[in-house]
């Protein structure tokens, strides 16, 4: 029996274990496998293979039963207000993992191979020393142990592989990177850009730096990825690999080394802590189908399960040394989460431009980098504030969905009313 246990443990032993297959988990797998480590990647959700598992990627609006809307009865089962029929296959039902909150809180999860790398907004701005020095400069929280110079080479490493489009804007508070050609601002954005430049010295409108390939480089072709087609169907899964996702990029790259073992449907229960060695030695999982508890072992363990799930795993990793969860000596695990402020919007009407129209779609948007709390603390809150500026493409206009395409091309003031964060291509032509 002892020999059987030893053999089973040996069979389940790897050089490294990565928990989670999303953006950070995919990168960990790529780097570990490239450097020769036999790596196990654990994913709690189902398998999603690039291209073949994007069921709605090439569907037209009229091919959906409800034209993209989700019926109320179905919507209630998911407990979320922004579901779309095109991306329902990525959604998690509310009762699959309930959570309690004091105030309304929407938690988007990615329980499938690739995780939220298939769902993210693809904006990739670099931090600067103004960000890293914030706590020390303004006297709050704990100082960062690194500065921009420490991480800048790694920004470049990631950007070259992932494919980031943008301009070199020369802003000290938003460092330039290894950019592919930018996506063009539309005529209204260009107008606002000029107005800001004329009236302010401390604020600019730029094209947001985004993880979309605009001019494929050899490294992208080696990954089997092509140019962004400006379809704006990104969250369905991109069969062209035009935007960066773990499915299209890092996971296949890791797999090509022959060093990666990907195990979907593996719900991580906890980290195994070796009391004698004083370090983590493995991972316990529950097979989503058989419900079997299985242990895997490695000297290197990366926890990349997302903010909430990583905390849950650590809290569940109880031992004599860590009776309230691995690494939870201060009792702060699972507390004080901060959320990304998403889809806040304002409306405005811009006069003129009635001699212009839009053509195509833009997966990114105009972006106003921080101009408060940069050189000094000049607001009553700490931190930064950025603005996304975007202009709706005609497909989002009400008349289009009522079967009146002429409403979309009629240059009336109505179609110039809204200014919100909508991912749409906006190239203006006379």
Image (spheres, grey):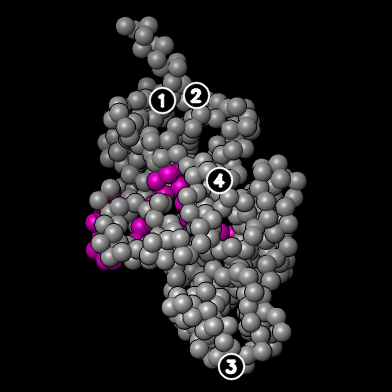
Q: Residue at x 53, y 64 (%)?
A: 134
Q: Which residue is mark 4?
A: 51
CA separation, marks 4 and 3?
Answer: 43 Å
Q: Which residues are magenta?
A: 97-124
In the rendered structure, find residue 351 and report the number of the disc placed on it: 3
Density class for disc 4 (Cα within 10 Å; few <14, some 14-19, many ≥20) is some
Front residue (pair 101, 113): 113
Q: Is residue 87 above or below residue 422?
A: above
Q: Is residue 44 above or below residue 132?
A: above
Q: Is residue 353 left or right of residue 313?
A: right
Front residue (pair 239, 417): 239
Q: Please, what secondary structure does the residue beneath circle 3 have?
A: loop
Q: Position of residue 407 (x, y in %)?
A: 52, 84
Q: Residue at x 35, y 63 (%)?
A: 70
Q: Is residue 197 left or right of residue 302?
A: right
Quadrant containing the N terminus in the rendered view: top left
Do the residues bearing badges 1 and 2 touch, measured as CB atoms within 8 Å? yes
Q: Nearer the viewer, mark 4 or mark 3?
A: 4
Q: Which residue is mark 2?
A: 14
Q: Please, what secondary structure does the residue beneath circle 4 have?
A: loop
Q: Quadrant of residue 251?
A: top right
CA separation, marks 2 and 4?
Answer: 29 Å
Does label 1 or label 2 sit earlier along the sequence?
A: 2
């Amino acid at each position: 029996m002892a020999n059987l246990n030893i053999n089973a443990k040996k069979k389940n032993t790897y050089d490294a274990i990565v928990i989670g297959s999303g953006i950070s988990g995919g990168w960990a797998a790529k780097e570990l496998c490239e450097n020769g480590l036999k790596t196990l990647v654990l994913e709690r959700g189902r398998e999603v293979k690039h291209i073949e598992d994007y069921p709605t990627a090439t569907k037209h609006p009229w091919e959906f039963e409800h034209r993209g809307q989700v019926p109320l009865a179905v919507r209630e089962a998911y407990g979320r207000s922004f579901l779309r029929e095109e991306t329902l296959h990525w959604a998690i039902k509310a009762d699959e993992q309930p959570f309690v909150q004091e105030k309304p809180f929407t938690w988007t999860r990615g329980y499938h191979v690739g995780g939220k790398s298939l769902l993210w907004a693809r904006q990739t701005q670099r931090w600067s020393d103004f960000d890293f020095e914030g706590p020390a400069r303004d006297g709050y929280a704990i100082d960062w142990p690194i500065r921009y110079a420490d991480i800048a080479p790694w920004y470049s490493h990631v950007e070259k592989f992932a494919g980031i489009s943008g301009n070199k804007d020369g802003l000290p508070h938003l460092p330039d990177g290894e950019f592919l050609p930018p996506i063009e601002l539309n005529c209204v954005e260009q107008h606002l850009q000029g107005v800001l430049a004329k009236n302010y010295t401390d604020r600019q409108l730029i094209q947001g730096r985004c993880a979309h390939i605009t001019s494929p480089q050899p490294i992208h072709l080696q990954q089997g990825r092509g140019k962004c087609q400006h379809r704006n169907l990104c969250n369905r899964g991109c069969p062209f690999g035009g935007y960066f996702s773990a499915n299209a990029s890092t996971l296949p790259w890791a797999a090509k080394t022959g060093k990666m073992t990907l195990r979907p449907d593996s719900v991580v229960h906890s980290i195994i802590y070796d009391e004698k060695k004083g370090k983590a030695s493995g991972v316990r999982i529950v097979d989503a189908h058989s419900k079997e508890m299985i242990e895997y072992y490695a000297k290197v363990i990366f926890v990349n399960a997302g903010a909430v799930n990583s905390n849950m795993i650590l809290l569940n990793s109880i031992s004599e040394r860590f009776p309230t969860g691995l690494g939870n000596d201060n009792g702060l695990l699972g507390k004080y989460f901060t959320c990304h402020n998403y889809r806040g919007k304002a409306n405005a009407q811009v006069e003129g431009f009635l001699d212009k129209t839009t053509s195509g779609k833009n997966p990114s948007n105009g972006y106003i980098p921080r101009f408060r709390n940069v050189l000094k603390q000049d607001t009553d809150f700490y931190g930064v504030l950025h603005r996304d500026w975007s202009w709706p493409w005609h497909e989002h206009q009400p008349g289009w969905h009522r079967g009146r395409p002429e409403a979309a091309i009629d240059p009336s003031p109505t179609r110039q009313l809204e200014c919100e964060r909508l991912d749409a291509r906006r190239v203006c032509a006379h």
